[in-house]
Structures are given as structure tokens and as C-alpha cells.
Amino acid sequence: MPVFQSIFLQGIWKIIYFPIWWYTKGLVKRIFDFSSGVLRLAHDLSLKIMVTHLFSPMFGETTKSGRIISFFMRIILLIWLLFLFILGTIGLFILLILWIVLPIAAVMEIISLLSIA
């Protein structure tokens, strides 16, 4: 009997502790994942490299027209990459907000369904 009591109490404790974990340790982990995701996104899109090589000629073309074409091509590419970076950051931020709001919305929906019946 003590084994079943221990399992039951452990299950009850996990149910009680889950919301506490969700908004403390779980949220801290999600915030860390958000920040590392933004850094990983910037790395994957090579934004730092694109900015540092903005004025260097592409394909070794050192003529004046080659430098001008390279500059404008990199500007266009940089605008596109910044757009993708902003879009990805917004997506990661929406996921973080969903982590915070979803349990509250689920509990509110359950309460409203129980009050109707």
C-alpha cells in the first residue's frame, strides 16, 4: 500500500508543480532558446559577413563599374537577408508569447466550458 500511496502523491505533486515549472524554469529555458535562436538565425543568414564585405568587390572585379555593381548587389542582398531575419525573429517571438499565453487560454476555455454545462 505505501508504494501506491507514494506513486499517487508523486503524481499529484507533478500535477501541482507543472504550472510552477512552466512559468519559472520552463520560461527561462524558452527565453534562452529565443535568444540563441536569434543569434543562430543571424549566423545562418551571414549578416555579419555581409555587412563587413559590403564595400569589397565581388569575384575580384576591381574596376569602378564592378565595384558599383557589387555594392548595389550586396545592398539588395542585405535588404533581403534583413527582411528574412526580422521575419524569423518575429516568428520566434510569437512562439515565446504562445508559450506564455497558451496554458492560460486553455484553463480559461476549460472554465468557460464547465460553466456552460
Image (cartoon, rainbow, N blue to C red):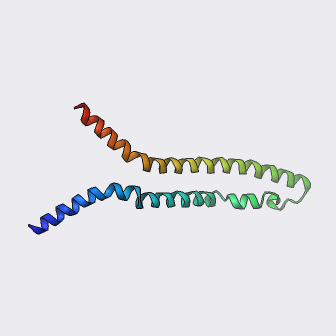
Could you say where residue 65 lies in the image, as x and y percent from the top left?
89, 52
Establish if 110 lies above or below 36: above
Q: Which quarter of the rendered picture does the N terminus lie within?
A: bottom left
Question: Is 4 displayed left or right of 34 in the figure?
Answer: left
Residue at left offset 17%, top offset 61%? 8
Residue at left offset 74%, top offset 47%? 76
Could you say where residue 85 lies in the image, as x and y percent from the top left?
62, 51
Question: Is 10 displayed left or right of 21 in the figure?
Answer: left
Q: Which quarter of the rendered picture does the C terminus lie within?
A: top left
Tell me which corner region of the image, top left, top right, bottom left or bottom right, holds residue 41. bottom right
Could you say where residue 87 lies in the image, as x and y percent from the top left?
59, 46
Question: Is 66 displayed left or right of 17 in the figure?
Answer: right
Question: Is 19 displayed left or right of 32 in the figure?
Answer: left
Could you say where residue 91 lies in the image, as x and y percent from the top left?
53, 48
Residue at left offset 52%, top offset 56%? 34
Residue nearest the viewer, comparing 58 with 116: 116
Q: Residue furthest top?
A: 116
Residue nearest the viewer, comparing 52 with 25: 25
Q: Residue furthest bottom?
A: 2
Q: Residue furthest right?
A: 64
The number of numbered discs placed on residues in the rendered structure image is 0
Tell me which corner region of the image, top left, top right, bottom left or bottom right, holds residue 51. bottom right
